[in-house]
Image (cartoon, rainbow, N blue to C red):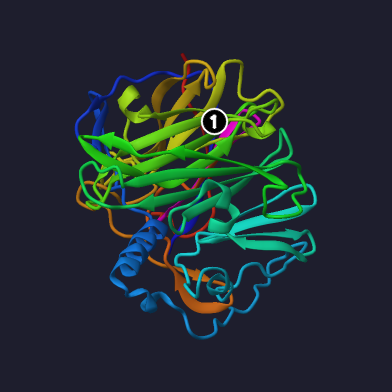
Amino acid sequence: MKQQYLFRLTVLPFLIFLLSLITLDTFAQTQDKIYTTEETTISGGAEFNIMLQEAIRNGNVDKFIYSGNFTSPTPNSLNTVTTFDGFDYDDNPIFNGGISFIPPDPSGVGGLDRVIAVVNTMIECRDTTGILLWQDDLAGFFTSLTPTTFTFDPKVIYDQYENRFVVVDLEIFEVASGTDPGNISRIFLAVSKTSTPATATSTDWWYTAIDAKEVIGGADHWADYPGFAIDEEAVYVTANMFSHVDGIFGGTRLWIIDKGVAGGFYGGGAATVTGGWDFPGLTGGSAGTHQPAHVFGSTGVATGVGTFLVKYSGLTTGGPGGTEAIQVIRVDDPLGSPTFVGPEFVSMGDIEDLGGVFGFPALPDAPQLGSGTEIEVNDRRTLHAVWRNNSLWLTTTINPNSGPGIRTNNCSLGSA
């Protein structure tokens, strides 16, 4: 049985470790510790999108047309202030030509008086009582950016500094392996003009797109599974990179977007974007899924500091008796000449039987309230990270040695 694992990491100045990269998934922290990590794989949303594109090209899209009714699970009995239904599985075909998308990849956030949620491949807005204000497919939402095909892996966050909603979504289109001008990878971003967007149109939103196609090892690579966060001055997007058609993992990248409240992205002007930074390669760290920390606090982390890029993915010295760790890389001077400090490895103790004789076994499916159908939780990638009150928090899914339950760890990031 698995759990959502919440780590609390007290933030102090960094103690920088010198690392020697051995392979993409195996690397040394110091001479006496070698960490391994589970393989980085393509997200379910991207896999579905690629299969759908192939079916469209071959005239076999009928197998993606859903005919029937989805039976919702019984509502749970959690002690919540307000509970209301969001997206229904049957909503997607209405907006997307009869096609139903899996996995849903739900993401949602509350603002001052409304809640915005996204799934593959829709967006909706409700007030805090659950009344639907507007709903659209994501290709329609981003229509001003002329999407080539259906999008995937959307996320939405609320920028508490500017009282805006911010949405990210991805696009991939494949023509050939190697390099080909027809290969496409784009990151779509939208920011609401106010805290109360009344429509899913340019009346209430500003939009921008980032060309995320990167040539790595002589081949085009596309961006998958975005990490997404803000601080007081910037928006951060991370992604795992996979080669077009072949689907070979090629590393991890970061893009930094200046908010530009006065005339930039947030102000309706041209967005200023830097990236994609190969921050694991620049620091000697481990590539793979990283989440940038969503920063809280009126002045951010500290003068000259942006955010932290956080990875778990089963990072371990190997079992039996080995220890698992969190990798943390700090982003400095994000809107000037970005530099990356670290990586720092924060030991979590022996929390899972991983590595060594155990290998990296798949996580068992998770039970859900109100249904006998279990949920596939995929791998151990970091799901979310937050910096608040001088502490760094993250969530991930593990299969703990000590049995199911929610746990919190508090540890120092080291000192210079």
Relative to the observer, which residue lies in front, 343 or 269?
269
Q: Which residue is mark 1?
A: 257
Q: Residue sitting at 37 percent across and 74 percent down?
A: 61
> Compared with residue 409, is residue 172 higher up or lower down, i.e. above or below?
below
Image coordinates for residue 220, horizontal then vertical, percent: 27, 41
Q: Is residue 401 visible?
A: yes
> Compared with residue 25, is residue 352 higher up or lower down, i.e. above or below?
below
Relative to the observer, which residue lies in front, 36 or 235?
235
Asked whether, in this view, residue 100 is left or right of residue 133, the answer is left
Asked whether, in this view, residue 262 is left or right of residue 290, the answer is right
Image coordinates for residue 240, horizontal then vertical, percent: 36, 43
Relative to the observer, which residue lies in front, 402 or 265?
265
Verify whether residue 394 appears in magenta: yes
Image coordinates for residue 85, horizontal then vertical, percent: 68, 70
Q: Is residue 313 visible?
A: no
Asked whether, in this view, residue 321 is left or right of residue 147, the answer is left
Tell me which corner region of the image, top left, top right, bottom left or bottom right, holds residue 205.
top right
Verify whether residue 383 appears in magenta: no
Query: In what quadrant of the picture does the N terminus appear?
Result: bottom left
> Compared with residue 17, is residue 175 higher up or lower down, i.e. above or below?
below
Q: Residue furthest top?
A: 416
Q: Residue sitting at 46 percent across and 79 percent down?
A: 66
Residue type, mark 1 in image: Ile
Q: Residue sitting at 38 percent across and 45 percent down?
A: 185
Relative to the observer, which residue lies in front, 218 or 29?
218
Tell me which corner region of the image, top left, top right, bottom left or bottom right, holds residue 74.
bottom right
Residue span colored magenta: 387-399
Helix, strand or loop at disc 1? strand
> Compared with residue 242, is residue 327 higher up or lower down, i.e. above or below?
above
Magenta-drawn stretch, dominant element (helix, strand or loop) = strand
